[in-house]
Every structure is written in C-alpha cells, then in structure tokens.
Image (cartoon, grey):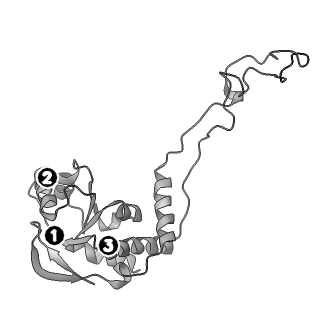
Amino acid sequence: MKVAVLDINGKDTGRKVELSADVFGIEPNNHAVYLDVKQYLANQRQGTHKAKERAEIAGSTRKIKKQKGTGTARAGSIKSGVFKGGGRMFGPRPRNYSFKLNKNLKRLARKSALSMKANDKAIVVIEDLNFDAPKTKNFTAVLNSLGLNDKKSLFVLGDLNNNVYLSSRNLKGTEVITNSQLSTYKIMNANSLVLFEGSLEGIETNLSK
C-alpha cells in the first residue's frame, strides 16, 4: 500500500512510501482489539474505592429491640446495612483491575487497529519536522494545513522531539507520541493517525518481530 508524503503545509511532496502489508494490510481481528483496549482502560483504574461495612462503622453493639413480639423483623445491631447510618452491604473494596495479555495478541491488536485506519483512509504520512522553539501556534498551523484542527488526531514521531511535543501539549484532541508509545487504544481513539516519515521504520520493526 503506497501513501503520498505531505509536507507541513499539507502539500504533496511528490514522494510516496510503501506501508508494510504485514502491519497495515492484515485482516483485522476485532476481538484482539477489544481485549487490548479493555486491558488499557483497566490499567488506568486506581482501584482505591472503599465503602465501610458494618464491622467498620462506629456505633453501639447493643441489641436495639427485643427478639420477639414487635411485629417487625428481628434486628441485632444498629450498624446493620438495612438501617440509615449502617454499613454498606457488599460495598466496593480496593482491588487491582489489571489482567495479563500475551505479547502476540497485543501485537496482533495493534496491527489490526493500524489496518482498520488504513482501510478507512485515516492515515496521513508527513515529512519529519522540527521547531526552533516550542510554540503552540506553530503546531496549530500544521493542524490547519492538514485539515485536522477539529478532529482527534494522533501524531507519531520516530524519536522524542521536545519542541514538537511541547508545542502540542496544550491542544485539546491532539496527542504526540513516539512509535514505542503506540497502543491500540490510542490508535482507535483518534480520528486521524499522522505518521512522521521517521516513525514508519520503527513501527514496522516493532510489530514485525
């Protein structure tokens, strides 16, 4: 699959790059994508939720009424969850939500996500760029040239470039990462995937192992 290389002004440079069919042209595996996205979101959860149960509530342990003859249900503690101010029954406890996926499945999920974007023609390849200083207006100009100012976009660098990263950090809906930080969730969460020329080799090498 050949894709035209654009410059930072959104103009065709006249060059084309070949996207590997093994990475950008496979039959997508929807279940692998689902599992990888699920794992990513699960790993974001802190799992620090906690509600007090009846043993943790401050209160009297006196039996609040006699066992029989009241016409209502028997009750032994004011801290029971059926009373106002009592403990919560089966409340949340701290837990770890993360789970394991094997490397081959995660690699398949990323290749499937990239292939979906390629099928939707949502991948743009631009030549590598660098800013003299971190300025948001410079990055905004690039977004406007590419027609991405009102879309969620993910820019993938070959190597870390602080000036480009810092220039994009204040822009809502835009994220800049390196090819080693690429994840299935980030790919699927973006409307457009913008790949710098220098990132292609790293992406294909990482996913062809």
C-alpha separation, residue under disc 3 versus residue under disc 2:
32 Å
Q: Amino acid at mark 3?
A: Asp
Tag 3: Cα neighbours inside 10 Å, few (<14), some, or many (≥20)?
Answer: few
Residue of label 3: 120
- Left or right of 52: which side holds 28? left
Q: Amino acid at mark 1?
A: Asp
Q: Nearer the viewer, mark 3 or mark 2?
A: 3
Q: Quadrant of the N terminus?
A: bottom left
C-alpha separation, residue under disc 1 versus residue under disc 2:
16 Å
Q: Where residue 34 appears, x then y in whole percent? A: 49, 65
Q: Residue at x 64, y 37 (%)?
A: 91
Q: Eyeballing the image, is 202 above or below 79?
A: below
Q: Amino acid at mark 2?
A: Pro
Quick check: can you spot residue 135? no
Residue of label 1: 128
Q: Eyeballing the image, is 199 above or below 17?
A: above
